[in-house]
Image: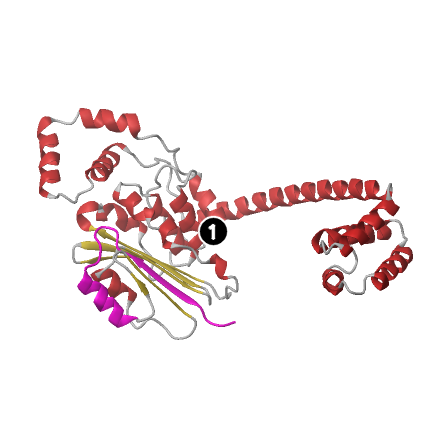
């Protein structure tokens, strides 16, 4: 397996300047570089720059993927637009989930490593699916932060006796970006389910938010208006929503669980889930087998017509349909203990259709992959 690495960075709050793009071009001549995006891939070699330094200077979100098992997600958020004190309890990992202050920003750095190489590069994900996490955090949604803590738990960077941080509401109903985070960082889905048991149900912000806004004292409303006038780039709606959530969204008041307790609950959840999945798979297989038997029985009712259709399909070079029918005839022969009859008729057809090598090559590959029939 050859190496494959992908680096993707995006600028969300403001586009890159021409000078900045020129600086990035000096780092990589092969990267796709635009006013809001820097992306490059390597089969051999590596990016000649430090990702943290690039984030500090240019970008707001970063995703890294390597097919030897490493994944990384970074988010840079202005300190004025996030409650750093509220985030800190969730970022306790040494490597897997870190929070650092860099200038006027908070940098969230999340990583996942596995010893199993990833041969299927389709597991790679786009940063577009993950970058909304940043806006969610700026709006006061702490679910991404709790998921970051689970990343550290999954990496065994949190002591078994350590208690979980405040449990935000809505862990049982993750947003698409949060679901993408679970998948990309390989957070144990059973651990997420166990955590959700201690999470209150999510509530709609709409009407309560507007009532809270209308009830703000005049002095406080004036302060918000002044801030909007002084900071023309400020996403005022997101800031107001974060303030509303900070004042009105209480955490779940249940007993804080330890990491050991969460893992035990996750294991019980895993056993339950796997039993349910096995039962569904067994039921689906039984239904498929029954449907297959009905299909073969119908085929047996017009066996001569089926052989005639089969040869006409081969003659017409309709090989996909012909192969499916040939396999049906083969399976019917196996069911009826008539394999020698099938072999004799098939060989006779092959001799009549020697020019149709494309079909018989497909037939050979199909038999090699499924020699005993379905």
Q: Up-down: is 142 above or below 14?
A: above
Q: Which residue corresponds to the image point at 85% horizontal and 59% vertical from the top-left?
A: 349
- The image position of residue 228, as x and y in percent, is 13, 39
- The image position of residue 295, as x and y in percent, is 78, 42
Q: Up-down: is 174 above or below 8?
A: above
Q: Up-down: is 86 above or below 153?
A: above
**Would you say residue 374 is visible in this rendering?**
no
Q: Up-down: is 29 above or below 72?
A: below
Residue 71 figure quarter: bottom left
Report the front residue among 31 and 56. Answer: 31
Q: Which residue corresponds to the image point at 40% horizontal and 48% vertical from the top-left?
A: 258
Report the front residue among 340 and 6. Answer: 340
* Horizontal side of residue 85 vs 201, given as left or right: left
Report the front residue among 108 and 319. Answer: 319
- The image position of residue 152, as x and y in percent, is 38, 56
Q: Which residues are magenta?
A: 1-28
Q: Which residue is mark 1?
A: 188
Q: Which residue corresponds to the image point at 64% horizontal and 41% vertical from the top-left?
A: 280
What colouring does the structure picture have?
A: secondary structure
Residue 29 falls inside the magenta stretch: no
User: Dot 1 surroundings within 10 Å: few (below 14), some, or many (20 or more)?
Assistant: some
Q: Secondary structure under badge 1?
A: loop
């Amino acid at each position: 397996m050859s190496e494959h690495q992908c680096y993707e960075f995006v600028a969300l709050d403001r586009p890159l300047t021409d000078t900045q793009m020129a600086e990035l071009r000096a780092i990589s001549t092969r990267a796709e570089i635009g006013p809001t995006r820097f992306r490059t891939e390597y089969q051999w070699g590596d990016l000649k720059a430090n990702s943290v330094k690039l984030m500090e200077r240019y970008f707001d979100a970063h995703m890294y993927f390597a097919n030897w098992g490493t994944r990384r997600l970074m988010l840079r958020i202005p300190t004025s637009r996030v409650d750093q004190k509220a985030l800190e309890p969730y970022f306790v990992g040494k490597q897997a989930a870190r929070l650092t202050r860099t200038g006027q920003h908070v940098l969230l750095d999340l990583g996942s490593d596995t010893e199993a190489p990833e041969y299927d590069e389709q597991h790679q994900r786009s940063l577009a699916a993950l970058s909304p996490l940043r806006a969610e955090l700026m709006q006061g949604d702490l679910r991404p932060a709790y998921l970051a803590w689970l990343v550290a738990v999954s990496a065994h960077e949190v002591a078994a006796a350590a208690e979980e941080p405040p449990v935000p509401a809505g862990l049982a109903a993750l947003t698409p970006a949060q679901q993408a985070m679970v998948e990309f960082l390989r957070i144990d889905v059973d651990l997420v389910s166990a955590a959700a048991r201690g999470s209150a149900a999510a509530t709609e912000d709409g009407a309560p938010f507007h009532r809270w806004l209308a009830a703000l004292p005049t002095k406080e409303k004036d302060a918000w208006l002044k801030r909007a006038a002084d900071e023309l780039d400020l996403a005022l709606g997101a800031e107001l929503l974060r303030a509303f959530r900070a004042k009105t969204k209480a955490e779940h008041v249940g007993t804080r669980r330890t990491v050991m307790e969460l893992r035990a609950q996750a294991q019980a959840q895993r056993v339950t889930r796997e039993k349910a999945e096995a039962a569904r798979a067994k039921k689906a297989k039984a239904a498929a087998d029954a449907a297959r038997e009905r299909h073969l029985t119908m085929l047996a009712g017009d066996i001569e017509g089926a052989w005639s259709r089969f040869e006409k399909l081969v003659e017409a070079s309709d090989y996909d349909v012909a192969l499916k029918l040939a396999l049906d005839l083969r399976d019917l022969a196996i069911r009826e203990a008539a394999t020698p009859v099938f072999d004799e008729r098939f060989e006779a057809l092959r001799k009549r259709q020697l020019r149709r090598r494309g079909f018989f090559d497909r037939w050979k590959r199909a038999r090699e992959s499924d020699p005993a029939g379905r």
